[in-house]
Image: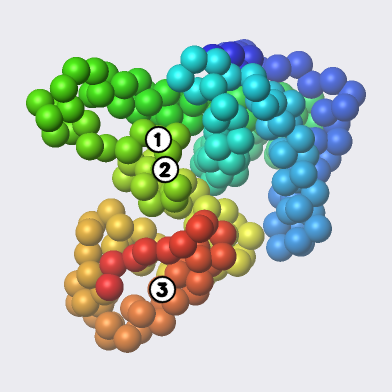
Amino acid sequence: MSTDTKSSVPRAGTGHNELATAWLDYCDHPENREASEAFGRHLDRLFRKRLPDRRCSGVLEGHEAEIRQEAYLLLVGSFLAGNRELISATQARDHGRIAGEILRSLSGSISAISRTLARHTIRYRQLHVGDPDLCPEAACLHPACRKSLWELPFELQRELVFAVLELAIRNKLLAARGVRIAMEMVDGNLSQSEVAASLGISRQAVHQQLAPVRDYLADHIEEEELPS
């Protein structure tokens, strides 16, 4: 597979000044829907340029759209917020560095998702060599045949869902408390009753805190499923 990923910071040309400007506008006005959507459009164009259809080969052939979608979630929910050089460049309002770091993070998100998907696909093929009756693990689905996010490996599910929720907090679409409760339940495999006991509140209060999170996930990721 080829994704044109490079370890060095890409040089930001004149066209990338618009990307940096969109990022700064988004950072200056995180509650502004137009600023958020404008930055998102820039990212979408970059993803399609970096990973166009029919670019992948080998085990990832034909999965470009899937990789772009999941890499986008990883980028906006984790890679950008965790890029210290981008934060520094943003504080300095250095357009060239900002664009370069966004491009580097974007390439990194594509590589991370591609590696994960390729690893699971290769593992699938290894398990399906020979008599499947001799290898019970071979009953797992090929990643390319999965119809829902929830059929992906748990760690990838967690990474993608948490990225979406972190972005929702940043955009003030969800209250941080409800998201943190949901994350605690997932990581600790806890029930609503157990979380209520640990927080010293009623189960109904926990349910009310989780309701907006459930609704948000239902609208933004195929379906939702939190412990009851």
Identify residue for label 3: 210
**Residues at discs 1 and 2 in contact (Cβ within 8 Å):** yes
**Which residue lies at the image location 50% right of the left edge and 58% below the top edge?**
222
The image quarter in which residue 95 lies = top right
Q: Is residue 139 visible?
A: yes
Q: Position of residue 116 (x, y in %)?
A: 41, 28
Which structural element holds mark 2?
loop
Tag of residue 198:
none
- Nearer the observer: mark 3 or 2; the answer is 2
Badge 2 density bin: few <14, some 14–19, many ≥20, Cα 10 Å: few
**Which one is earlier in the sequence, the residue at label 3 or at label 2?**
2
**Which residue lies at the image location 25% right of the left edge and 23% below the top edge?**
128
Q: Position of residue 200 (x, y in %)?
A: 24, 80
Identify residue for label 1: 143
Q: CA distance from mark 1 to mark 2?
A: 5 Å
Q: Is residue 101 visible?
A: no
Q: Position of residue 46 (x, y in %)?
A: 73, 31
Q: Amino acid at mark 2?
A: Arg
**Residues at discs 3 and 1 in contact (Cβ within 8 Å):** no
Which structural element holds mark 1?
helix
**Relative to 87, does residue 32 appear above or below in the rendering?**
below
Closer to the camera in the image, 192 or 22: 192
Instruction: Count every numbered label the image shows and give the total.
Output: 3
